[in-house]
Amino acid sequence: MKCILLCAGYATRMYPLTENFPKPLLDIKGKALIDYLIEDLEGNNLIEEYIIVSNHKFINHFNDWKDNNKYKNKISLLDDGSTDNDNRLGAVKDIWFAIDKADISDDILVLAGDNLLDFSLKGFVDFSKEKNGNAVMRYYESELARLQRTGVAVIDSNDKILEMAEKPKEPKSNWAIPPFYIFRKECLKDIEEGIESGCKTDAPGGFIEWFSKRNEVYAYLMPGKRIDIGNLEDYYLINKEKI
């Protein structure tokens, strides 16, 4: 399995901190945000290669980070060519960009490079293997306003997605779907087909809505919390808390 880390965003809500520096490399208690994800994967021997997708504006920062790390697995850096928030490719196009440029023919784990988890990804990978299928994560969200801002799925008793909607006005369940995915190698071409067919490509939940109508997708119940550092207040708060 290979891991695609999506790091090509511009984090405009965190300006001026991220105006000239990538959010995934921000310091969290002495190490880069992205290091928490990679250290978990390394420690559990889950991944053979990390493919990090950056934008053109920040690629040199990632090159410097790579030069100073000592991870045992291969790290490949890709520049998606975008230069600002207005011409960004979007998450789904960046996933396909990585698959195409890195010539990936393996199962892939896709992670948003600017999130923290207080649990290991091993359970998620094991879940996908047990189901022998594509997988997403899910968590229970009680607040309507939050459900209206994310992907929401209807799940059967076998954890399979029956229906998925991105930012629904009237959610049909309380199962929210964050941006963490496992795609089986035989389904990778569907990512390109989805883009060509005009499915939503900026918010990845919109793509999962399309993808789950064509393929079996299972939803793993998160055993802990996902910490999305979306603004400066979140960033300064997490640096004060215990990780």
Image (cartoon, rainbow, N blue to C red):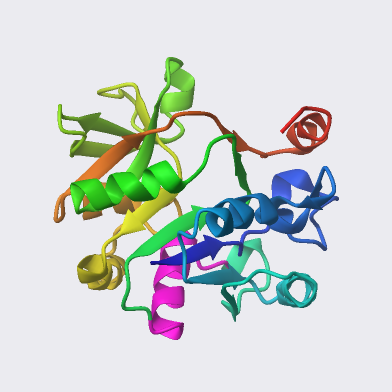
Identified at 54% across, 36% down, the residue is: 119
In the foreground, 12 or 142: 142
Q: Residue 158, relative to residue 115: is it above or below?
A: above
> What is the magenta range?
88-103
In the visual, does 122 lie left or right of 221?
Answer: right
Q: Say which quarter of the image contains residue 63.
A: bottom right
In the foreground, 27 or 17: 27
Does 218 appear in magenta?
no
**In the rendering, at what x and y percent does residue 194 appear?**
26, 65
Q: Residue 225, relative to residue 135: is it above or below?
A: above
**In the rendering, at what x and y percent does residue 88 appear?**
57, 66
**In the rendering, at what x and y percent does residue 118 appear?**
59, 34
In the visual, does 228 lie left or right of 242?
Answer: left
Q: Residue 227, relative to residue 37: is it above or below?
A: above
Identified at 26% across, 69% down, the residue is: 185
Q: Say which quarter of the image contains residue 59.
A: bottom right
Identified at 61% across, 38% down, the residue is: 228
**In the rendering, at what x and y percent does residue 139 appear?**
40, 28
Q: Quadrant of the N terminus?
A: bottom left
